[in-house]
Amino acid sequence: MLGVSGEIDKLGDKLQDLKNFLTDVDRRNITDETVQVWVGQLKRAMYEAADILDLCQLKAMERGSSSTDAGCCNPLLFCMRNPFHAREIGTRIKALNQRLDSIKERSAAFNFINLRSYEDCHSSNVHISPHGNPSQETVGDSDRSAIVGYKIEEDTRALVAQIMQRGKDDNNGIKVVAIVGVGGIGKTTLAQKVFNDEAIHGEFSKKIWLSVNQNFSDVDLLRRAIIEAGGDAQPPESAKTSLHETLKNTLIDHKTFLVMDDVWNHRAWDDVLKIPLVNAAAPGSRVLVTTRDEGVARGVKAILPCHHVDILAPEDAWSLLKKQICSSEIDEDHTNTLKDIG
């Protein structure tokens, strides 16, 4: 009768709307003082909502022995059944809703991004693997801020030397080298370092970077390979056989270096890319595969032993963490006081 139920629904909706901006708020709260003031107002409103629930809990406990209300185990519902309490609680909820309206209006000035909605939408369009992260396309260019320590330089030199080594190749003249390691360990970063190495750049006339991922499409993989190799873009409805022919014509007599990043199934090589490369690319062409599964490396007949990526040394791990958060030497001095925690 007092309309309190509707006010409770409004309160829930408003809190949910504000919650959707919290990811962006957290991101900007660190440096923007006006955002900090707004966050303080929102927090006080949240505390008020918690106080209302606590008050209902106390009222229910005071009347806990009453036979009339013994069947009601929800404190808020108990307060709504009691006209006196309903009026008191309802008045506070209405006042809180008005505060939240004001807070929400002020939020418009900050142009907060609804990151939660973006993440929900994005996650519905990618396949989430029970074994790791959603499929994510990578590129051949490397992020220098993600590269630390001398070990990656050693690994890069060793892999480049292995790739450049002449001799009898497997796969009918194409040597396959594999980098193996768990998700997130740095396989892609290492492959990017090799891909961009000056010696590699000078040795191969065609360089192709393909992010394969778990649910690759044969046609899409071939279309991307053609574009990466400098060929003309092909329509999505192209047949696999015609794409094979186009890729062969693009690679013919070219010494080619192909990187297949994040391979989950050896058929991405055996059934899709192997035939055009073997039949067209010049002798001495090479393939570098990154994978989490050594069985995939064996499936593509990579040279054994495979290159395994090890975890970072503690000092390198700390250096990487600092690189992500320090923008100046002053920041670094402050951050170094947190080294034990980091």
Image (cartoon, grey):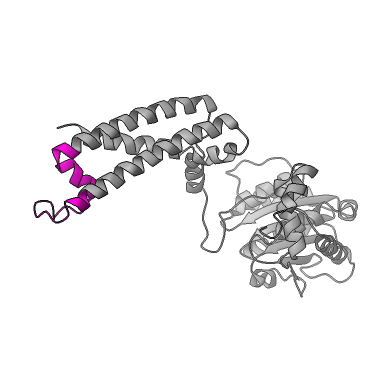
Closer to the camera, 274 or 195? 195
In the image, is residue 163 above or below residue 80? below
Which residue is at the far bottom? Answer: 305
Q: Is residue 306 visible?
A: yes
Q: Is residue 276 visible?
A: no
Left or right, residue 101 beside residue 231: left
Which residue is at the far front? Answer: 62
Does the magenta run of residues contain 83? yes
Closer to the camera, 153 or 95? 95
What range is drawn magenta here? 60-85
Left or right, residue 121 beside residue 165: left
Can you give x and y, in whole percent of width and height, for residue 253 in the image? 85, 53
Closer to the camera, 173 or 257? 257
At x 82% / y 51%, what residue is drawn?
A: 196
Can you give x and y, in whole percent of width and height, for residue 67 in the image? 9, 55
Left or right, residue 217 beside residue 48: right
Q: Quadrant of residue 160?
A: bottom right
For the N terminus, the quadrant is top left
Which residue is at the far left? Answer: 68
In the image, is residue 281 above or below residue 143? below
